[in-house]
């Protein structure tokens, strides 16, 4: 029983001696005894983590938290960098008035990536530090070792320990348990995977590179062929071209006539002066439409909606948009004209109308938003506004002049 | 043996000294605060804000403690028994905040809008928006609600303390059973009262503003501040030889974990509130943050972001910090200060922006606020020490005490 | 205070406390030996044939899963027009079901992570099944956003992959946060679940009698041999994953709530959404765990491991989170009035009194009223009554999402755009199909993997702790252990 065992024999290299225990108490006591005997390379095997065993064995705490911390911090930095570079540098695109890189909107993804990388570190770090997977191990040769995942406890002292002595070590273990101490051997060549697994693994790895290679080839090469689409999507849609026949309709034409009662845009106004503001080649200086209080009120309302944001309520070019642009010192901003400049006041009514309809310089065209009538109403209101801001006491009707004096 | 062990766990004659000292500090602070408050020449409007801040700060410690105690009974916790008496005493001290806040409530109920601007019927009439909620923002109704809130808190905390003390000398576990049985409904009442009290006492300082998460925000800060205070009180008592054998590093570790958890929870709630309002960008909501991100308040906001969340989060992450009482106490002090800053950030901006006076001397947070905090704190501490004087500082009869004494973290 | 013995020295030898001392009950009924736990769990997997009810159940659920595949193929081939989503309700059952399933997915991680940090040892009996349920629910949830994008073949645009258009996704959009949150959550839940499974797979490997089982379980057991050094890192990794998963679980449903809350739609934009969604998610997740654990423990004879105490605790959590949800409803309603915003006021009145009032009151009844039955101990300890309540809760939580999504969209700012949403049969069949997928995966899990975490349950058994002269090494001094000494 106690004669020395050679470290290598026909069963392979000696891994160590294994003692079996039936409960936590005895294995903990044994671990303490082995630790006190000065062994380093020994391990306890149990079906569940034993509370306090690391103290009994004299284990140091693991470095895992530091690995997790490093990965978590890298995740944080990478996520911020990714979001900054993609959304603010490489593809800047303003959406819903949000800054290109505003921290509040970038926090959720930063958080998620931090957690993801930390979790990877904890999971893979644990298995790497434990040197798992390791499907083959000398201890599995032990006839009763499968109890270690059920209700048995084992303590193995490895042959690699400096204090290992095949006689004394075995005696020490035998003194701690009533089960027979067993020597376990690492099977020869057991640390290599079968060759078909290795060949298969390499093949799979190479095949996995093919899509990547194809993508690289596509990105670097030139071709005149159209792009290859697996799903045609909306690239080519079934449709009829203009001026072709279509048997579906009774008249055999693909182009459909306008439904009855369709009115062309601006169709009913026939007076070219009303439509263009021009009498012949010259701008009209008289209103081509009738002006009354209702028209002026309408003009004032439209002015408030379309003009005042830039030109200001009184037309001095100090609307909210203009002021904001001024505050922000927007470099490309052209300040809106004051409607009370001599130049603007001198403009013919027709030219004002044209400006409203078609825009001028950076001012956009409002022809699509406003009807012709409304545009003339705005022109009438602008003229009234100019009168109001540049009037003299003489302009006030006599009946009201007394009131003016009273002020 | 009898006399020594009892003496070890009660304050004894030292309590009288401490309470006198605290009262003295409190009275001095109050005098200073009153003097500073008079210097604003605004009918003590600024002083009222500072006073509210101070009362709410000490109130939230009690509310956090109340939550802790009810929670321990609700989940039948074992580890916390040795620190629960301290929490019970802090919770029962809510009566101090009730007394000191009462003049402000009465003043508002009398129709003065110098603190809660809606309390002035004129300002209510002037705003169509406020007229819509005039039924709620009514001085007398407000006062009634305050009585209900404080009634709930005082009643609940006294009930918890009474049964717990009863258990000290009871032959069986009946008092504890009663507490555990009723902890669940108590928690429901607590949640409702704190939620709406936060709306009434703090959110209505900016009467047009609203945020559904606001109650949770105040709650998160309150519980955090309690855990910070608990660490400090326990380590103070241990430094004077009390609780020495009852509280171990394991209990500090758990208090530290909760402190850390609530730092994080506060950050989560604060971020949710800010981000949602920032993102939707509705003027009636952004107004509240707009004020707090302008002028000297901008700096305070940055201090909160770093001081109330990022730094303590990083600092308390490590298990080693939580297990070293010195480090943990430093963070506890820091977080209590931050909690005060957080409340100041809620309470004070309307003082400078809501009443015409564009800015006041001393920037965002002034000496008068500190003086008020000291004044209320002195009275609060006085009452706490007095109520603790003749009681065991450990629930010696608690049936889970052995479990708590033997408690060990994994 | 006047005792003859120093009350504080209870723990030291020889003294005694007056009055009662409470100890923690053992969490497992019946035979409490280590081997018995292994046997009871492994017998389910190793039995030559599962119970007949298993065959019936999987036949039904697998047929429903086939129907789901049919619906998805039809949807992809035809377009999202086959669903009821249309102007103004562009988010219909797809988003309702997505949020519903993501919510259910929260219980698993809550049990495995948060309850772990809170040292709630009763979790050991139910965490494995709850985590598995989480993964299956995430599968059902993740499917919806993927198929509702329309052109599913370009769904990879959701990810920041370099492409020939030189475009990047908009990271400021909550919908992209969702992509990251849900995929992170699925990944971390999978890692957490698999890591806990490794020692139990080793148990199955070591008990296997056929080479196929030994190889299959052995391959996934990664050669686990229960080394103390391995356990040490394993426990540390478990703790770290729990600490990471705890804020993660908060963040996922918060991000889902951001999908709604960052908008300006009345009834969606409210700041309490993040914590309120999280509470609701836990609420529905626990209800689903109870709904499936009660039949499972009956069917597979696990009543000794998943005891009434476990179920009762889960019911208490349901009651607590249900109350939080109720409080959030009340707060929302109050602030809708208090805020003075006419649109908000209208939205909430419309929910309670408008065309979808039926859905609203189903939600209120199932989510706020039904869990109140759990105040009664006899209801929360009766298996079939608790399943009834939990099913109601699941119905209620489905309707909560329906009410949020549909009522707000159908009554937007513009009265001219108002409409009424009706699901199509395809909508309904797709949802029923996801239920089939969920139960199919769960039934397969019950049959082929250990339904209870064997190694973790062993740590709460009396035999898990040393009884020796040093005391401190074992559990005698450990607060939560069942071995607190009567001193």
Image (cartoon, helix red, strand yellow):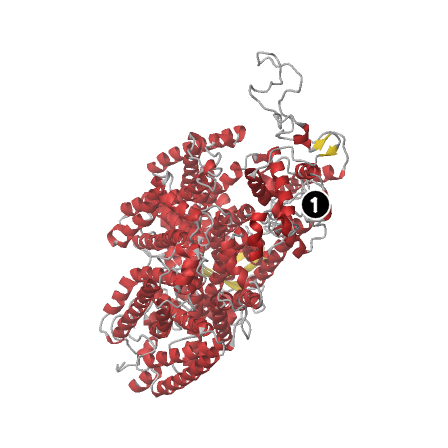
**Horizontal and vertical percent position of residue B80:** 37, 69
SS at mark 1 in the image: helix
Q: Along the line of sight, which residue is nearer the eye, C242 or A185?
A: C242
Q: Is B228 above or below relative to A283?
A: below
Q: Say whether residue C2 is visible.
A: yes
**Horizontal and vertical percent position of residue A213:** 70, 39
**Horizontal and vertical percent position of residue C309:** 31, 55
Q: Is C340 above or below relative to B263?
A: above
Image quarter where the C terminus of chain C lies is bottom left
Alpha-carbon neighbours of circle 1 within 10 Å: few (<14), some, or many (≥20)?
some
Left or right of B114 in this view: B312: right
Q: Along the line of sight, which residue is nearer the eye, C211 or A169?
A: C211
Q: Say whether residue B173 is visible.
A: no
Q: Quadrant of residue A327?
A: bottom right
**Horizontal and vertical percent position of residue C66:** 45, 31
Disc 1 designates what residue? A345
The chain holding disc 1 is: A
Left or right of B286 in this view: C25: left
Image quarter where the N terminus of chain C lies is bottom left
What residue appears at the point 52 percent right and 28 percent down from the top-left corner? C78
Left or right of A72 in this view: B83: left
């Amino acid at each position: 029983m106690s004669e020395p065992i050679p470290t290598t024999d026909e069963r392979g290299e000696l891994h160590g001696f294994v003692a079996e225990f039936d409960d936590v108490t005895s294995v903990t006591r044994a671990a303490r005894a082995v630790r006190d005997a000065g062994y380093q390379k020994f391990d306890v095997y149990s079906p569940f983590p034993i509370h306090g065993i690391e103290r009994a064995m004299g284990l140091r705490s693991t470095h895992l938290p530091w690995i997790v911390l490093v990965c978590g911090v890298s995740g944080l930095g990478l996520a911020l960098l990714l979001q900054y570079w993609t959304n603010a540098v490489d593809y800047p695109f303003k959406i819903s008035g949000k800054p290109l890189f505003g921290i509040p909107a970038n926090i959720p993804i930063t958080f998620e990536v931090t957690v993801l990388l930390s979790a990877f570190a904890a999971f893979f770090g644990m298995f790497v530090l434990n040197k798992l997977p390791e499907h083959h191990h000398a201890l599995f040769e032990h006839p009763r070792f499968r109890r270690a995942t059920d209700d048995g406890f084992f303590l193995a002292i490895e042959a690699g320990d400096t204090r290992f002595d095949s006689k004394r070590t075995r005696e020490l273990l035998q003194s701690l348990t009533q089960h027979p101490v067993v020597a376990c051997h690492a099977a020869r060549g057991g640390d290599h995977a079968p060759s078909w697994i290795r060949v298969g693994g390499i093949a799979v790895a190479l095949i996995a590179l093919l899509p990547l290679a194809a993508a690289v080839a596509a990105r670097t090469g030139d071709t005149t062929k159209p792009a290859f689409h697996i799903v045609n999507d909306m690239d080519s849609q079934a449709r009829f071209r203009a001026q072709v026949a279509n048997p579906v309709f009774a008249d055999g034409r693909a182009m459909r006539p306008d439904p009855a009662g369709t009115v062309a845009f601006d169709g009913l106004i026939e007076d070219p002066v009303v439509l263009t503001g021009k009498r012949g080649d010259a701008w009209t200086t008289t209103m081509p439409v009738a002006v009354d209080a209702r028209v002026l009120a309408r003009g004032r309302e439209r002015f408030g909606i379309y003009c005042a944001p830039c030109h200001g309520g009184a037309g001095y070019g100090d609307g909210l948009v203009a002021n904001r642009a001024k505050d922000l010192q927007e470099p490309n901003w052209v300040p809106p004209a004051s409607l009370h400049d001599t130049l603007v006041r001198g403009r013919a009514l027709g030219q004002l109308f044209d400006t409203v309809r078609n825009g001028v310089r950076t001012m956009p065209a409002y022809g699509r938003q406003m009807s012709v009538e409304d545009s003339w109403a705005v022109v009438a209101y602008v003229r009234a506004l100019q009168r109001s801001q540049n009037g003299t006491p003489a302009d006030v009707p006599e009946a009201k002049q007394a009131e003016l004096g009273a002020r | 043996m009898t006399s020594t062990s009892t003496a070890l766990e009660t304050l004894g004659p030292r309590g009288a000294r401490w309470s006198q000292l605290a009262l003295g500090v409190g009275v001095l602070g109050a005098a200073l605060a009153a003097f500073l408050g008079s210097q604003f020449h605004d009918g003590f409007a600024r002083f009222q804000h500072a006073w509210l801040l101070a009362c709410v700060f000490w109130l939230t410690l009690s509310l956090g403690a109340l939550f802790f105690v009810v929670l321990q009974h609700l989940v039948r916790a074992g580890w916390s028994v040795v620190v629960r008496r301290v929490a019970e005493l802090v919770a029962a001290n809510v009566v101090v905040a009730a007394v000191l806040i009462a003049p402000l409530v009465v003043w508002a109920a009398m129709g003065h809008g110098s603190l809660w601007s809606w309390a002035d019927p004129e300002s209510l009439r002037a705003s169509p928006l406020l007229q819509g909620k005039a039924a709620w923002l009514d001085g007398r109704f407000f006062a009634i609600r305050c009585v209900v809130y404080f009634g709930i808190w005082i009643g609940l905390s006294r009930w918890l303390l009474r049964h717990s003390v009863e258990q000290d000398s009871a032959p069986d576990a009946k008092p504890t059973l009663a507490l555990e049985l009723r902890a669940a409904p108590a928690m429901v009442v607590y949640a409702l009262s704190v939620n709406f009290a936060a709306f009434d006492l703090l959110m209505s300082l900016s009467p047009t503003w609203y945020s559904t998460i606001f109650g949770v925000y105040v709650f998160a800060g309150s519980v955090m501040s309690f855990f910070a205070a608990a660490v400090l009180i326990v380590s103070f008592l241990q430094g004077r030889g009390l609780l020495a054998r009852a509280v171990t590093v394991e209990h500090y570790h758990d208090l530290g974990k909760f402190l850390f958890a609530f730092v994080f929870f506060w950050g989560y709630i604060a971020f949710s509130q800010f981000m949602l309002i920032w993102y939707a960008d509705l003027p009636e909501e952004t107004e509240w943050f707009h004020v707090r991100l302008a002028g000297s308040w901008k700096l305070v906001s940055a201090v909160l972001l770093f001081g109330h969340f990022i730094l303590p989060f990083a600092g308390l992450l490590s298990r080693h910090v939580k297990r070293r009482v010195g480090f943990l106490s430093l963070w506890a002090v820091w977080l209590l200060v931050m909690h005060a800053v957080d409340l100041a950030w809620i309470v004070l901006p309307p003082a400078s922006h809501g009443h015409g006076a564009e800015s006041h001397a001393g920037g965002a947070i002034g000496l008068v606020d500190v003086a008020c905090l000291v004044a209320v704190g002195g009275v609060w501490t006085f009452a706490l020490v007095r109520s603790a004087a003749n009681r065991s500082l450990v629930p010696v009869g608690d049936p889970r005490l052995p479990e708590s004494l033997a408690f060990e973290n994994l | 205070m006047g005792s003859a013995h120093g009350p504080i020295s209870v723990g030291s030898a020889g003294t005694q406390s007056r009055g009662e001392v409470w100890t923690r009950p053992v969490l497992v009924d019946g035979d409490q030996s280590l081997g018995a736990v292994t046997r009871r769990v492994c017998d389910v997997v190793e039995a030559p044939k599962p119970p007949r009810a298993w065959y019936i159940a999987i036949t039904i659920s697998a047929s429903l899963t086939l129907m789901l595949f049919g619906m998805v193929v039809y949807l992809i081939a035809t377009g999202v027009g086959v669903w009821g989503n249309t102007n103004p309700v562009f988010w219909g059952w797809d988003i309702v079901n997505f949020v519903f399933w993501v919510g259910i997915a929260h219980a698993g991680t809550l049990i495995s992570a948060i309850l772990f940090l809170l040292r709630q040892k009763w979790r050991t009996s139910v965490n494995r099944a709850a985590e598995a349920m989480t993964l299956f629910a995430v599968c059902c949830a993740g499917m919806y956003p993927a198929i509702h994008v329309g052109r599913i073949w370009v769904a990879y645009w959701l990810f920041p992959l370099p492409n020939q258009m030189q475009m990047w996704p908009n990271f400021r959009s909550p919908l992209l946060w969702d992509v990251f949150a849900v995929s992170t959550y699925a990944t971390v839940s999978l890692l957490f679940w698999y890591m806990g499974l490794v020692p139990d797979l080793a148990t199955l490997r070591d008990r296997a009698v056929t080479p196929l089982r030994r190889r299959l379980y052995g391959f996934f057991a990664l050669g686990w041999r229960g080394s103390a050094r391995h356990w040490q890192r394993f426990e540390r990794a478990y703790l770290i994953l729990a600490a990471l998963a705890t804020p993660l679980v908060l963040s996922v449903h918060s991000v889902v709530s951001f999908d709604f809350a960052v908008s300006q739609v009345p009834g969606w934009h409210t700041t309490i959404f993040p914590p309120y969604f999280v509470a609701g998610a836990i609420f529905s997740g626990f209800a689903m765990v109870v709904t499936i654990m009660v039949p499972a423990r009956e069917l597979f004879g696990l009543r000794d491991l998943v005891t009434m105490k476990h179920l009762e605790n889960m019911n208490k959590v349901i009651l607590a989170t249900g109350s939080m949800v109720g409080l959030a409803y009340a707060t929302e309603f109050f602030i809708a009035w208090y805020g003075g915003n006419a649109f908000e006021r209208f939205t909430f009145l419309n929910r309670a009194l408008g065309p979808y009032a039926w859905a609203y009151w189903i939600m209120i009844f199932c989510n706020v009223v039904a869990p109140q039955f759990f105040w009664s101990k006899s209801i929360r300890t009766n298996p079939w009554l608790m399943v009834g309540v939990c099913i109601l809760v699941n119905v209620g939580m489905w309707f909560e999402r329906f009410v949020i999504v549909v009522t707000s969209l159908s009554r937007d700012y513009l009265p001219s755009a108002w409409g009424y949403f009706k699901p199509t049969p395809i909508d309904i069949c797709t949802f029923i199909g996801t239920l089939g997928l969920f139960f199919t995966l769960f039934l397969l899990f019950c049959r082929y993997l250990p339904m209870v975490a064997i190694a973790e349950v062993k740590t709460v058994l009396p035999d898990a702790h040393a009884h020796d002269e040093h005391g401190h090494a074992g559990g005698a001094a450990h607060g939560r252990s069942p071995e607190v000494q009567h001193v």
